[in-house]
Amino acid sequence: MPPARSTARAREGRAAPAPRARPRPRAVPGGARGIRWDRVGRMALLFVLFGVVALYISPSIHLVETWQESKQRGSQVTELRRENQALRARQSALRDPRTLEREARRLGLVKPGERAYVVRGLPRDR
């Protein structure tokens, strides 16, 4: 048993073990700092993100331009339909012989066998 006391006394007399010093980082060839792969990975992901965003920008712009053009074309179609309706009404009116004769007189035409007279000095209608 006596040896147990001596071991206890030896422990008491000893100072607390000094904290272990951290091992120094090894020198990396190619510079004092070396390559930080975590940063390289982050930068690569950032470039990929910008690439994906760039790929979405152009189609988005074309989509908006096409939408605006379709609205403009839609208004042109509405205007052309109105004009078409007016022209069809004019066409049906010109098939009437009275309207045809009125238009010919307005242009200064006469029927065969008629004599044309020109009256000058009348006030013009405005």
Image: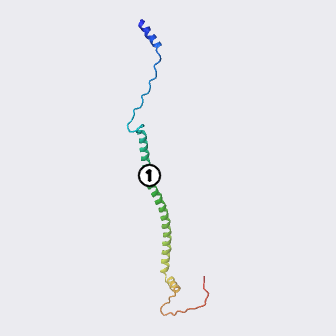
**Residue at 50% in and 65% down:** 75
Q: Position of residue 51 (x, y in %)?
A: 42, 49
Report the front residue among 116 and 112.
116
- Locate residue 25: give its quadrant: top left
Q: Nearer the viewer, residue 54 or 22?
A: 22
42, above or below 1, in the image: below
Tell how many labels.
1
Name the amino acid type tagged 1. Ala
Is residue 98 toward the left or the right of residue 28 in the image? right
Residue 36 in the image: x percent, y percent?
42, 39
- Residue 57 percent coordinates (x, y): 45, 53
Quadrant holding the C terminus = bottom right
From this viewpoint, which residue is outermost toward the left? 29
Q: Nearer the viewer, residue 76 or 47?
A: 47
What residue is shown at x 41% (from left), y 7% (from top)? Answer: 3
What residue is pinned by disc 1?
A: 54
Residue at coordinates 47% horizontally, 62% vertically from top-left? 69
Q: Secondary structure at mark 1?
A: helix
Residue 32, quarter of picture: top left
* Relative depth, front residue between 64 and 109: 64
In the picture provided, is 28 more to the left or to the right than 16?
left
Q: Which residue is farthest top?
A: 2
How crowded is the residue under tag 1: few (<14 C-alpha within 10 Å), some, or many (20+)? Answer: few
